Amino acid sequence: MIPHFPALRLGKPYESLDKTDLTPLNSEEPIAQISQVNAGIIRRDYRKIGVATAALESFSTDKLIEISAEAGRIFMNETLPVGDTGATQDPDEYIRTLSSTTGLPYSLCRFNVQKIEHVITNLTTIIKGLTRGLPTKIFDEHIIQVDGIDVCYFPAADSVGTVLPSNAPAVNSLWAPAIAMKVPVILKPGREDPWTPFRLIQAYIAAGAPPEAFGFYPTDHEGSDTILNTCSRGIVFGGDETVSKYASNPNISCHGTGRSKVLIGEDMVENWPELIDTIATSISANSGRSCICASTVITPRYGDEIAQALAEKLSEIQPLSPEDDNARLSGFANPAMAEWIDSKVEEGLAEGGARDISAPLRNDAPRKTEQFGQNFLHPTIVRCDNIEHSLARTEFLFPYAGVVEMPQDDMLENIGPSLVISAITEDRPWIGKLLRSKDIDRLNTGLMPTCHVQWEQPHEGNLFEFLYHRRAIQRAVGN
Amino acid sequence: MEDLITKAKNDLDAHVREIVQWHFNPETGCQFWLEWAEKQGWNPAEEVQSLEDLDARFPDFQDEYLRDLQPEVWRPKGEPYNNRPFSIFETGGTTGMPKQRIGWDDYKIDYSAFSETLNDDHFPKNHYWLMIGPTGPRRLRLAIEHLANVRGCSCYFVDLDPRWVKRLIKDKQFDQAKAYMEHVIDQAHTILKNRKVSALFTTPKLLEALADRASLVDMGIKGVFCGGTTMDPQYTRFLVEEICENEVGFVPTYGNTLMGLARHKPLSSEDNYSITYYAPQPRAVLRVIDDKTGNPVEYDTWGRVQLTTLTKEFFMPKFKERDEAIRRKPIEGSPWDGVGEVRPFGAMEKKIVEGVY
């Protein structure tokens, strides 16, 4: 019997009459079934969310951090239930099935899983970064004294609804700290990756977390929308269309295309060959699928040379079998997505003003290729004549970047909204201007890839500020 | 069971003969069918002796007839219809010129018969009903009031204009659609707070929205009569177990202005909440056919729903509904084919706008 993923309604398994099959990329044979629930079920469960909050309130945050660390260890090392039919998975089986349905090679699955483990086993550091060093008892008592001043924070959220993607298991690390902050989570798993959130929930429960704190609702678009609009806070991952749908709602944190960029300063550009490895990592880490991967490289000079060197470096990344430890390129779970991306690149090239530097390196063989039973897109570097070209600032779901030349003084006004900027420079006045920019969410300065994460820094939105608000408090003497 | 099926078939064939003879008799038939027969070169009144004959000799009924022609062409010349004003009923939720059907007593006959299938515990007699749904030019409003009246009840109404909802959804004005639904539910909730009501007729989505405001049980509802949009097994289970709290009687229906009202096989968890409807045969016949060949599909497989209406007021052979369903076997009480898990035709291939209605 194949595993069946039930919905978890405030921790309680629920088998729906409406089930979908989950099949690996290279097979028609289902390897799991997933119970689908309608939006109404989510709305009705939300009315009982107080039960979940109360369950978390019965723990101290220090204890929940301890549980979280133990959950990290279990998630990484132990055999855990997969679904509700009695089936279990050890870590290797988990990686194998995750790879088979998402197209991520084992090596990238492990990379993603390690990121989750790192976050949930280091919550003390991470929460310290998010709260700017407030003691954890702020979550238990809601009022503490800092330098003799009362500081009061209250939970602005009774739950955080998270609509997860299928292609990036590591994003599960974003909701996990909410548990330690005593905010229940309502998750909608990605269609191809129910494995990771379910396993993570099981690890938390095995470590002693209250099951009621976890909602797991495989559902349709209406259900996703209900999760985001019903929970008092929501997190969603998706493309521009998804982000624009929710962008005006301050209670929903949208993680869309990052349009992250590498900027090369005048002071460093003469040393461009030494920068190539770091820039290539920015473009290709996690198979270019993260929003913190660079999709644009802007340099004041040597655009052709840099594009050529990047294309050569990235051409080393070839489709390999998912089991191969050297595999760094992900297949596409949905072949139509690979086709669509490929056609968008070709359309952009047909406009003129842009050249595919990678194509000659593979003897002009097609960018899209089917190997090992999967669809891949070969890494692609496009040299664009100017930043306005449609391929210069577009993010795709594979190792891709547009390379543009531009004077350093013009860069800031042309970058547009960027989740991460890696500014390879030591030019203090320019760094000062970058620090003041409203277009940059995260700024890396010096030779640092865009995908580098320091966990004590807020990452991809500050979850604490999202879930908690500061309250003014005034107490009479002796109170 | 075989005897019941045979008897039902014989009764149906006798009814087919009676109705065809009525509609194709120059003394009693309507202008449309008499003129149609003249052009065919054969006499249906003599040559159609059974449903098989009807199926073989008649083409599919075109819904344009009901859009393009004036209503009086459908008036039978025979008594009691010849000099009696008729009602004009329109179908569902499309925009543009709607399909229209004329009628006199059919809906009363159909809904009186349907009343016999309702349980007095869930639909108490001599009490009050509330209908939340399309009134306007639809037969449904009069039919529900008649059904309530037959049971000694009176009915409150809250209107919903499905044509407006469809337009909002088509234009992607989802906020407006939601606001309109809230407006409808506000009115219904006000009635329920201030009046004693034990039975509801509404659509699944409106029922869900109403139950989001307050428990149906707490509002005093004992029975819900529900139709209008797709109810797949999981959704039906949700309505029964969670919206109706396993306490309020839940009666799904399938019907429209052209047919009347199909009854459902009583729901059970053994059937996994799969709803099967049975037409009010012999007055209407529902079949599940292959859309290309017109032949019935095998039992337990999907096909297009085909309706034949056979009353003295209205004869409509072989009309392809905009629905598909699973062909289900006859049951005791309705020993003829049923239509299971009805959903919009092509629902698996394309997104169908059903909206709040």
Image: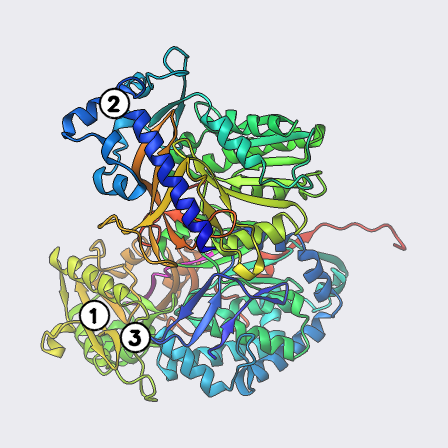
What residue is shown with label 3? Answer: A331
Look at label 3 and name its amino acid.
Answer: Gly
The chosen color scheme is: rainbow
Q: What element carries label 3?
A: loop
The reply to whether residue A26 is in sight is: yes
Of residues A357 and A373, the one drawn nearer to the viewer in this rendering: A373
Residue A297, percent across and down?
Answer: 27, 66
Q: How many labels does the image show?
A: 3
Q: Is residue B135 left or right of residue B18?
A: right
Residue B218, percent across and down?
Answer: 72, 42
Q: Quadrant of the C terminus of chain A?
A: bottom right
Magenta span has B65? Answer: no
Cα distance between the residues tagged 3 and 1: 19 Å
Indicate the chain on which mark 3 is placed: A
Residue at the image position 49 percent from the left and 38 percent from the top:
B178
| B65 to A107, vertically: above or below | above
What residue is shown with label 1? Answer: A381
Labels 3 and 1 touching (C-beta < 8 A) = no
